[in-house]
Image (cartoon, rainbow, N blue to C red):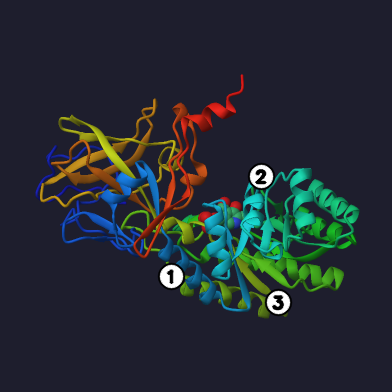
Amino acid sequence: MSRSAHPAGPRHADVLPEGHYTAPPADLNSLDPRVWAQTVERTPEGAVAVGGLDVRRLAEEFGTPAYVMDETDFRARCRAWRDAFGPDADVYYAGKAFLSRAVVRWLHEEGLNLDVCSGGELATALDAGMPAERIALHGNNKSDEEIERAVEAGVGRIVLDSFQEIARVAHTAARLGRRQPVQIRVTVGVEAHTHEFIATAHEDQKFGLALAGGGSSGAGEGPAAEAVRRVLMLDSLELTGIHSHIGSQIFDMAGFEVSARRVVGLLTRVRDEHGVELPEIDLGGGLGIAYTPEDDPREPHEIAKALGDIVTRECEAAGLAVPRLSVEPGRAIAGPTAFTLYEVGTLKELEGLRTYVSVDGGMSDNIRTALYDAEYSVALVSRASAAEPMLSRVVGKHCESGDIVVRDAFLPADLAPGDLLAVPATGAYCRSMASNYNHALRPPVVAVRDGQARTIVRRETEEDLLRLDVG
Ligand SMILES: Cc1ncc(COP(=O)(O)O)c(C=O)c1O
């Protein structure tokens, strides 16, 4: 992200303070379609609408802060991923991005599978009617109860993450008289983030079993090969494939290329050593989205083609039949479909620096800025404004100076208490990572579609908080 001054000079400073921002848009009222959900538009009156509903009406009916999710966009993204990968591949939506019963129903109806990584996510999926065979269970420390519930329900895939887990799942499946389909999660020595990736021989992280152990393919005598050996010896486990997930917010396909090559290296080794050709390969999630207009993610069909070509090429080179591919996008489906609606409470102008704009939420509903230094954009949505741009920092109401929602943004200089702001691209890892810090009440998720709005996750109440406080 570049640093530059607004040619006309922003309101506060001729020399802009340290920060990550580009020049303000020519029109502060414009809504860049790269960061806003599909049905978001500015109405002739100047306010913003989504799914045909004015945000002022949504704020009145549902309160603020609130996550507003464009159901039309969510469903369209599901279809785009499903159609891009076609009938010979599977798309597992990563429920950690955001999961609720309504979302499970949308996924089911739109033909997606679901990746869950906890007992709570599994319970939500099953409760909302996702067929168990379309569920994959992840996690680096699944409890015995979680394993038992998954095997009992008949989930289509458990992704094994450690040697202990191989034994636990095998034991549970044998006790329940089942043969459980499993994949082995491997770490391929690739760390990918946005436009960069690093390919290494070893990985220092908690997930998966390392391929590394020698050989140019990276698929040497590492723990992953040993895991394959052990799983193949257990009658209650059916090894269907190898799983790899290399990072998050990835735009560059090169990391997947190294990952696929190394996974195919293991598949080749399994064939040579055990005479078994594993029929599945899962390359995980991590595909990036636009949080600000500077981000330029690829479309699902481009990603599907790139990944399909990589896997086909690597398998053909190794003389293997091309396995069934699956992917696990979370952010790329849910992220762009929602914005968080806030009300401005106070404004504090720091002469020569910027204006701190405090909203009625903060790090309890969006921890990503504080946690990852994530960048977001923001817009005034309750009205249009012709005022000059004002360098702003949108902050929350929590007792932390790091309680920042949008670090650097230009908002109109006539911004006032009571105005509504919206932060786009908050559909993933915001509600799902929300907390009760300062006993904040977690905001509702409001789904909007064709002129109708409904709460799909209700706002927490003080009663909810006090119900858990049993001392
Ligand atoms: C195994 C696995 N699959 C999929 C995902 C989803 O990633 P994203 O939401 O970035 O697509 C994650 C994220 O942590 C993951 O660990």
> Do the CB atoms of the residues marked 2 and 1 lie less than 8 Å apart?
no
How far from the left and from the top, in percent, is residue 107? 55, 64
Question: What residue sits 69% from the left and 56% below the top?
Answer: 186
Residue 227, located in which quarter of the rendered image?
Answer: bottom right
Three-letter amino acid code of the residue under disc 3 = Ala
First in sequence: mark 1 or mark 3? 1
Q: Secondary structure at mark 2?
A: loop
Q: Residues within 10 Å of mark 1 (few under 14, many from 20)?
A: some
Q: Residues within 10 Å of mark 3 (few under 14, many from 20)?
A: some
Distance, label 3 to label 2, CA atoms, is 30 Å
Q: Position of residue 266 (x, y in %)?
A: 73, 65
| Nearer to the camera, 61 or 182 | 61
Q: Which residue is mark 2?
A: 206
Name the mark on residue 273.
none
Query: Does residue 314 appear to the left or right of 298 in the view shown?
Result: right
SS of the residue under disc 1: loop
Task: Choose between 65 and 197: the one closer to the eye.
Answer: 65
Q: CA distance from mark 1 to mark 3?
A: 29 Å
Q: Which residue is mark 1?
A: 299
Whether residue 202 can be seen here: no
Residue marked by disc 3: 318
Q: Earlier in the sequence, mark 3 or mark 2?
A: 2
Amino acid at pointer 2: Lys
From what the image shows, is residue 456 above or below residue 273? above
Q: Which quarter of the image is occupied by the C terminus? A: top right
Residue in view at x 50 percent, y 30 percent: 463
Q: Quadrant of residue 179?
A: bottom right
Residue 262 appears in which quarter of the rendering? Answer: bottom right
Q: Answer yes or no: is residue 267 visible.
A: yes
Residue 64's place in the image compared with 86, above or below, is: above
> In the displayed structure, would residue 417 be above or below residue 84?
above
